[in-house]
Amino acid sequence: MAAAATQAPQQGPSNAAGRNQQPTVPFPQASRRAREQPLTFTVTPGTAAVTLGPSDLTPNGFLRYVDIHVFTTTAATGSPVGATGFPFCIFQNLQFIDTGGQKMDDLSGYALFVDNYASGFPWRGDPTAAYDYSASATSPNFRLRIAREIFPDGRGALPNLSGSQKYRVRLVVDALSNIYSTAPTAAPTLQINVIDGLWLLPAAYDGGGRPQQRKPPLLGLAQYRTSFYPGISISSKTISQQIKATGNLIKYIAIIARDTTNTLNDALFADPFTLRIDNSYPYDNVPFAEVVHEYEAMIPERTQRLTGVLLLPFNYGLGSYVGANGVASWQATSTATYLNLQGTQVTATNGTYDILVCEISTAEIDPSERAAMNNGTGTWQPAIPQTVQGGV
């Protein structure tokens, strides 16, 4: 019987295409990080607040953050004493304005300091840990960051490529009477540098001909910071304060408490403390000291605890520290979610709360990566591609 002829295996079209297909270079490898200084101001605080801007940021790539560096060029004279929150109280207000004219951030200087402290951007977040930080009443020197990027692979960075539709910042330097409790004989002269951190726009192909990802993952993921109910009055020993910042994912909640002398004071907080979210209680009659201990353990490299500030972080991700990779820990809410702070003060103490909430919007630009609403819970979570490490 004749032996069957041996034939070479046939190469299917799909196999050939797969072998010839070049892998796509991921965005963090395709792009490069860069920094530039689009703005600088010189100001001497006076009897009235001084408004700087709104001023355009330079269009270039994808915006990761805006750093604001304040330093002294001519020192104050006399024997001044900084007010509560000095030197960050030099700013009465800071705003980051999107290309459509809407405010993404609208904060006091001290609230932005608390955001830096709690936000967990992948850097040394506590501004007081900077090598050149100075709280000197005559020669202050400090940096604050308005972070846009949420994770170091570019998630949260904003497209900043339009020459006609630009992002802007607006800074308000407060009056001397609000910056100092004891005014200087002559006010300091301050220089304010605004520095952008960005991802450069990658080329379509690298030098080896491989296609490159030209935008960050989940482009459209964005964070917004607003100080809700600034200066809300606390005049009862029994605390019951609803937070109406719902409808998005919550990255953290921060409460800044001041007594009637404008001093940051822990006595205004409930002890024990309860946080109610609909019919669940993430903190249920927890001693105040334990609430503080929990969030302090999540903040790496902080220099000291902030008296009069209570942080409720949901941005601990997979690493159990603020800013860790992963989104599963973010607190999902719908517009109907009920958030309430409650409990009783140990000693009746009147004053005010500033409530700062950082929200994450998942309004994805790319339809394939848009968030999907889970009808079972009525909450939103971003659809994470499998290629995004830690995207759970």
Image (tube, helix red, strand yellow):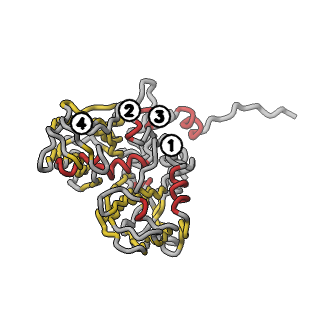
Q: Label 4 sits on what residue type?
A: Thr
x%, y% of residue 237?
41, 73
Q: Residue furthest right?
A: 1
Left or right of 65, for residue 310 = right
User: For the residues marked 3 and 4, what is the alpha-carbon distance in whole angstroms?
Assistant: 51 Å
User: For the residues marked 2 and 3, what is the alpha-carbon distance in whole angstroms?
Assistant: 16 Å
Q: Secondary structure at mark 2?
A: strand
Indicate which disc, 4 or 1, sits on the residue closer to the N terminus.
4
Q: Label 1 sits on what residue type?
A: Pro
Q: Residues within 10 Å of mark 2 (few under 14, many from 20)?
A: some
Mark nearer the viewer, 4 or 1? 4
Left or right of 238, for residue 386 = right
Q: Secondary structure at mark 1?
A: loop
Report the front residue among 226 and 98. 226
Q: Secondary structure at mark 4?
A: loop
User: For the residues marked 1 and 2, what is the alpha-carbon distance in whole angstroms?
Assistant: 24 Å
Q: Which mark is residue 300?
A: 1
Q: Which residue is mark 3?
A: 25
Q: Which residue is mark 4?
A: 138
User: For the residues marked 4 and 2, what is the alpha-carbon distance in whole angstroms?
Assistant: 35 Å
Q: Are marks 3 and 4 in contact (CB under 8 Å)?
A: no
Q: Which residue is mark 2?
A: 33
x%, y% of residue 198?
34, 36
Q: Residues within 10 Å of mark 3 (few under 14, many from 20)?
A: some
Q: Are marks 1 and 2 in contact (CB under 8 Å)?
A: no
Q: Is residue 361 visible?
A: no
Q: Is residue 353 visible?
A: yes
Q: Secondary structure at mark 3?
A: loop
Mark nearer the viewer, 3 or 4? 4
Mark nearer the viewer, 1 or 2? 1
Report the front residue among 148 and 340. 340
Indicate which disc, 2 or 3, sits on the residue closer to the N terminus.
3
